[in-house]
């Protein structure tokens, strides 16, 4: 067992921190190339503790499972507190975190997804209907439109109408603002969080947040009023009225009770909705944008996907559609090459630990690195090639392939986002032929918490294909 830390660059701490902020992908590539599966950076400012990045599946697996109790989590999510609130899942630790996950899980998995499929398809249909042959599109923006609408309808459960329009407009404005570096810096530096009136940056944010909260609370009040009006009588069989079954995440959460049998308060509901919005919107849109990027640069893969969709039975329901093997492999391979989050949540050691042949002292920060793991030559042959087939030929473990993180804090929206990505992708590529219209090389670009194709990534609509629309039957 070596008493020294894994190797790493000798640059001063502040320079390492600056490199990780300015050119994270290049810096991580360089370190993985030079130091291999495990390297130490000092990227948390002047007095940075050792921050150790892992891509060796054995070590990653241990961090996610057997070693889980030896870490503290949570500090990095503090920057989101002003947006998501104190009650948010991502602000919780230990038992409270476990209880909240248990409560949220059913709304984002299994049977519930079934009901979301036709809504996702209808939204995609509405947003893509005006697309015309010859038109050039910013796919990232269009995917963001679709994914925001999915959150509004499937997560918030808001029916189209004036409240939905008002919320969409305010949320889109806020979500755009927080991706701008100058605006978002105030979330990282609490001394900048001064309310100097609505025209000051922080005052403006507080005002936007209050307007959004007002609309969400109004929706919750309305839903509570509706559900008490439809409350079945004590003698009636509650399962006999299917219209009372919640069809969205908010509706389901409103039926839940916490450990003491108490329903969630309006504030708790609001905080969870904002959490799902913040973590579920740009991420899914980014994942989709990369899938379109890879398909547009690999016509063979696009043709194979279109063929699979054409060959599928005409009456395929959304759940079965999402099981199509090549469609699934395309999404997996896109998320491998361009994981939307570069790392799983950093874990701070509470006690000394021996791992991967090294000894770590309390205070060291350990990071399962999604980005370097997904480009590891020992796991993936030709790691930089877009080759969806690799997911049909081989099964990768949860420590080799983990675009949604791992362990007790892995992504709770994984099933929903994969489902959404597949349905949207299938519907668009079976309807349209698209070609790359970007000028120059498309490079990954930071957008809030995600990395997406640069703004020059555009697609041109070449052909309105007859095949898809009939195939991807839109349920009413
Ligand atoms: C392609 C889409 C997405 C990707 C790549 C993604 C990725 C991730 C990653 C890497 C984490 C951190 C896991 C860890 O630290 O190990 C995470 C956490 C989380 N994600 Fe996602 N996500 C996506 C979509 C969504 C969606 C659609 C939702 C909700 C509607 C969502 C909700 C969350 C939440 C609430 C957490 C925090 C879980 C916790 O702290 O217990 N994500 N996601």
Image (cartoon, rainbow, N blue to C red):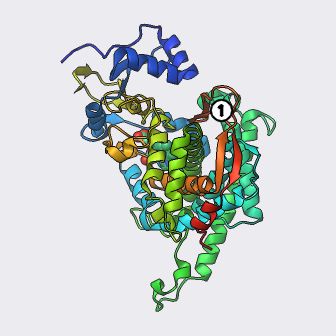
Confirm whether residue 276 shows in the render. Answer: yes
Left or right of 124 on screen, residue 305: left
Q: Could you say where residue 157 lies in the image, as x and y percent from the top left?
A: 61, 65
Confirm whether residue 206 shows in the render. Answer: no
Q: Residue at x 18, y 18 (%)?
A: 1
Q: Could you say where residue 152 lies in the image, as x and y percent from the top left?
A: 64, 58
Residue ranking furthest to the bottom: 235
Question: As rendered, which of 272 and 55 lies closer to the eye?
Answer: 55
Residue ranking furthest to the right: 199
In this view, 256 is above or below 6? below
Dot 1: few (<14), some (14–19), or many (≥20) neighbours within 10 Å?
some
Q: Could you say where residue 388 lies in the image, as x and y percent from the top left?
A: 44, 43
Q: Residue at x 77, y 46 (%)?
A: 134
In this view, 91 is above or below 261? above
Kindly identify which residue carries mark 1. 184
Image quadrant of residue 451?
Answer: top right
Count of all numbered marks drawn on residues in the image: 1
Question: As rendered, which of 92 and 33 lies closer to the eye?
Answer: 33
Left or right of 299 on screen, residue 234: left
Q: Quadrant of the C terminus?
A: bottom right
Q: Residue at x 41, y 28 (%)?
A: 372
Question: As rendered, which of 271 and 470 lies closer to the eye?
Answer: 470
The local secondary structure at tag 1 comes to helix
Left or right of 406 on screen, residue 75: right
Q: Could you say where residue 182 lies in the image, as x and y percent from the top left?
A: 70, 28
Q: Residue at x 52, y 81 (%)?
A: 242
């Amino acid at each position: 067992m070596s008493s020294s830390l894994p190797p790493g660059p000798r640059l001063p701490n502040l320079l390492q921190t600056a490199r990780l902020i300015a050119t994270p992908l290049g810096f991580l590539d360089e370190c993985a190339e030079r130091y291999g599966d495990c390297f130490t950076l000092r990227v948390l400012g002047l007095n940075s503790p050792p921050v150790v990045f892992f891509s060796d599946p054995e070590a990653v697996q241990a961090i996610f499972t057997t070693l889980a109790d030896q870490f503290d989590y949570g500090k990095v999510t503090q920057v989101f507190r002003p947006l998501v609130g104190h009650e948010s899942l991502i602000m919780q630790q230990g038992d409270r975190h476990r209880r909240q996950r248990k409560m949220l899980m059913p709304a984002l998995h299994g049977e519930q997804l079934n009901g979301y499929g036709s809504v996702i398809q209808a939204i995609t249909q509405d947003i893509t209907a005006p697309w015309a042959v010859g038109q050039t599109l910013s796919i990232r923006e269009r995917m963001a439109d679709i994914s925001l609408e999915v959150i509004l309808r499937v997560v918030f459960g808001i029916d189209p109408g004036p409240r939905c329009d008002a919320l969409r407009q305010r949320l889109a404005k806020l979500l755009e603002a927080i991706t701008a570096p100058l605006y978002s810096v105030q979330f990282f530096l609490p001394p900048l969080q001064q309310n100097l009136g609505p025209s000051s940056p922080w005052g403006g944010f507080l005002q936007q947040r209050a307007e959004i909260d007002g609309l969400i609370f109004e929706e919750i009040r309305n839903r509570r009023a509706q559900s008490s009006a439809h409350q079945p009588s004590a003698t009636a069989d509650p399962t006999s009225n299917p219209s009372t079954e919640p069809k969205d995440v908010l509706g389901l959460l409103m039926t839940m009770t916490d450990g003491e049998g108490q329903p969630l308060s309006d504030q708790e509901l609001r905080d969870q909705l904002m959490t799902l919005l913040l973590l579920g919107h740009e991420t899914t849109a980014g994942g989709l944008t990369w899938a379109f990027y890879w398909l547009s640069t690999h016509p063979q893969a696009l043709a194979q996907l279109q063929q699979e969709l054409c060959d599928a039975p005409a009456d395929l329901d959304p759940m079965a559609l999402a099981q199509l093997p090549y469609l699934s492999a395309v999404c997996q391979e896109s998320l491998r090459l361009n994981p939307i989050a570069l790392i799983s949540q950093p874990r701070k050691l509470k006690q000394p630990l021996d791992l991967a042949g090294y000894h770590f002292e309390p205070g060291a920060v350990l990071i399962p690195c999604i980005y370097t793991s997904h480009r590891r030559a020992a796991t993936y042959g030709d790691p930089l090639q877009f080759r969806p087939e690799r997911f049909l030929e081989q099964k990768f473990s949860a420590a080799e392939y983990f675009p949604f993180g791992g362990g007790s804090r892995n992504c709770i929206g994984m099933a929903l986002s994969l489902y959404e990505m597949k349905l949207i992708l299938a519907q668009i590529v079976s309807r349209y032929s698209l070609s790359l219209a970007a000028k120059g090389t498309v490079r990954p670009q930071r957008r809030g918490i995600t990395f997406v194709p640069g703004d020059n990534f555009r697609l041109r609509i070449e052909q309105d294909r007859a095949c898809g629309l009939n195939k991807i039957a839109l349920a009413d």
